[in-house]
Image (cartoon, rainbow, N blue to C red):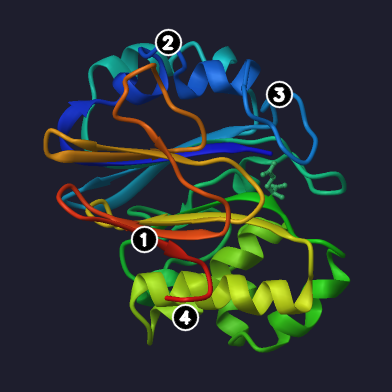
Amino acid sequence: MCRHLAYAGPAIPLARLLFDPPHSLSRQSWAPRDMRGGGTINADGFGVGWFTPAGAVRYRRATPLWSDTTLPALAAALPVTGVLAAVRSATEGMPVVETAAAPFGDTAGPVPHHGGDLTAAAGPWLFSHNGKVTGWPDSMVKLAAGLPTADLLTLEAPTDSALLWALVRARLRSSPPAAAVAAVVAEVEAAAPGSRLNLLLTDGTTIVATTAGHSLSVRQGDGCVLVSSEPLDDAPAWRPVPDRSLLVADAGELAITPLGEA
Ligand code: GLN
């Protein structure tokens, strides 16, 4: 498992998601409560992406979130309106490197180890995957073969999650976000049955998420929406998202439909 969250709403300090709440993402990195499908802690890296007038920016590391001594003060002083953050427990056989940590997406500024032009077409999205594609890598060879070469050349890491992002990104060029995400889940489940596919996608305003094998909760109100693998606190407004759901939400709207029926 990994743990991920997305927020859309009025500006709040980033620390309000990562560090301040009793069950913050940082706490979830070493004491997650609802692990399914193996794994104990999320120590194999983390990432935070947020939206700015210059585009999305990311801060990622291949080390545990709790061990970062710079981020707490930075996060306390950084107002954010749209965020996707994740802590990672690497699936066996997949590398523990910064580029394998979510969020994936097109971000402002120089893109490490390849030019920015090839990734510019997908728009301002941030993406994360909690789960595992079964039969990796063979199961996804066929799926990857359908991708434009440019998308394969810009894969950030040799992991299932990076390839899932490439599949979603390709779909986003011609489909609305919820349809793109649902189509990728269907496509991957056909090629790799038994996969766990909790996907999370946001442009800073709209959040699209799936549940297929892992936990997810949502909290909406006061002009904001927060979607998280595990509730950050005991507030009664948290509501669990049933397994095999497609969630589409923004600060005012929330729709949860069964996966496959969207
Ligand atoms: N399979 C993904 C990875 O290795 C996600 C892992 C997870 O959800 N634990 O990065």
Query: Picture coordinates of residue 117 (x, y %)?
Result: 41, 73
Using the rendered image of the protein, determine whether residue 111 is visible from the camera's viewpoint: no
User: Is the residue marked by circle 4 packed among few (<14), some (14-19), or many (20+) residues within 10 Å?
Assistant: some
From the image, tell me which residue sits under label 2.
22
Q: CA distance from mark 3 to mark 4?
A: 32 Å
**Of marks 1 and 3, the one in the foreground:** 3
Q: The N terminus is located in which quarter? A: top right
Identify which amino acid the numbered label 2 is placed on. Pro
Mark 1 and mark 4 residues within 8 Å of each other at the beta carbon: no
Residue at disc 2, secondary structure: loop
Q: Which mark is residue 125?
A: 1
Q: Residue at x 35, y 53 (%)?
A: 109
What is the distance, in whole Å, between disc 4 and disc 2 at their CAs? 37 Å
Mark 1–mark 3 distance (CA, rounded to whole Å)? 27 Å
Can residue 162 be seen here?
A: yes
Mark 1 vs mark 3: which is more N-terminal? 3
Q: Position of residue 87 (x, y in %)?
A: 57, 33
Q: Earlier in the sequence, mark 2 or mark 3?
A: 2
Instruction: Inspect the image, locate mark 1, and give the three-letter code of the amino acid beneath it.
Output: Trp
- Comes first in the chain, label 1 or label 4: 1
- Rounded to the nearest angstrom, the CA distance separating label 2 from label 3 is 17 Å
Query: Amino acid under label 3?
Result: Ile
Circle 4 or circle 2, nearest the eye: 2
Q: Which mark is residue 186?
A: none
Chain-order first, disc 3 or disc 4: 3
Residue 41: give its label: 3
